[in-house]
Image (cartoon, rainbow, N blue to C red):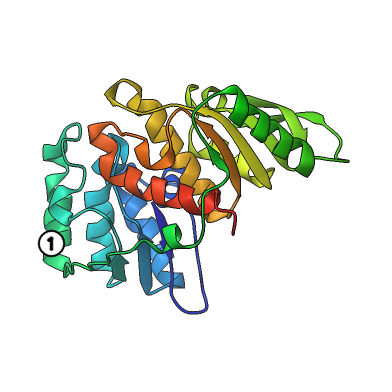
Amino acid sequence: MSFSAFGKKYFKSKLLYKINSFKFNNAKKNDVIELFVKEIKKKINLIYFDEFQVTNIADAMILGRLFKEIFNQNIIVFFSSNIKIENLYKDGLQRDQFIPFLEIIKKSCIEINLSIDNDYRLEKGKSERFLSPLNSTNNFISNKYFREISKNKKVQEINLDIKGRNFKIKNFYDGIIKLNFRDLCDKNIGAEDYIEIDKNCSFLFLENLPNFDENNSNQQQRFITLIDILYEKKIPLLITSEKRLHEISSSPSLKNPFKRTISRLYELTSIDY
């Protein structure tokens, strides 16, 4: 969940991560959110939450108190989302504890439906760097492209230390990285790891993207997070996939946020990108 402030100041960060890492001397646990929002108020008067969604219990539990304090501090808030207010965190774990947040938003915000027929990302160009199915022909195309853009670059093996976790990248060519889907999404890693990888990446080759259903929803959630982070920094991609881009299915619980991911993949793999 990223936030932006209009005007001269512009912020992009993981808000809940900031709250979790925010510390005050001698502050009681229940006071942290209030103090955190007061710090925000010193810097900005308006926050824009772009493509707002709630996908896990940790986020859901903190949002009620967070936004209650945001509105108490008279900070103006805009949201954009693919999901209606009443459908946020739908069917989520312990959703009954999330209802107070929904009531706060309904009371404090005006919901407007913006109907747009065309996705501008799909209009930018053809996604020629999204290769499917997984076969020898597309594997050859991918390897040829990799050799072309990594030409005259020295291969290295780098180790990223992320809060004590070690992430090894064997195929590192001065910012050009080749990784298997399993390397990034089968492991118990998340946003902090992807942000660190993103810092070292100028072009990512992602191999063996699977189809998604309820059986691999955890991997799909990580993939959504990965693409969100790559999109923020506009990192171009070449992907080899089991299914064509418009054919990739989703686990039911992630159907709505995955629409945004598919849209972003069209842009990140476009020949015009």
Q: Residue at x 12, y 46 (%)?
A: 99
Q: Nearer the viewer, residue 50 or 124?
A: 124
Instruction: Give percent across and percent down for residue 156.
Output: 81, 30
Q: Residue furthest bottom?
A: 7
Q: Nearer the viewer, residue 249 or 181?
A: 249
Can residue 25 be seen from the camera position used here?
A: no
Instruction: Give percent across and percent down for residue 237.
Output: 59, 44
Instruction: Give percent across and percent down for residue 83.
Output: 22, 53
Q: Residue at x 27, y 67 (%)?
A: 116
In which image quadrant can residue 41 be found?
bottom left
Number of marks drawn? 1
Tag 1 secondary structure = helix
Q: Residue furthest front?
A: 137
Q: Nearer the viewer, residue 205 or 89?
A: 205
Horizontal side, residue 211 vs residue 76: left or right: right
Q: Is residue 2 above or below residue 140?
A: below
Horizontal side, residue 256 vs residue 13: left or right: left
Q: Residue at x 17, y 41 (%)?
A: 90
Q: Which quadrant would the C terminus be assigned to in this image? A: bottom right
- Amino acid of disc 1: Lys
Q: Residues within 10 Å of mark 1 (few under 14, many from 20)?
A: few
Can residue 69 be seen from the camera position used here?
A: yes
Horizontal side, residue 127 vs residue 40: left or right: right
Identify the residue under disc 1. Answer: 106
Q: Is residue 44 above or below residue 267?
A: below
Horizontal side, residue 63 vs residue 147: left or right: left
Instruction: Give percent across and percent down for residue 72.
Output: 23, 67
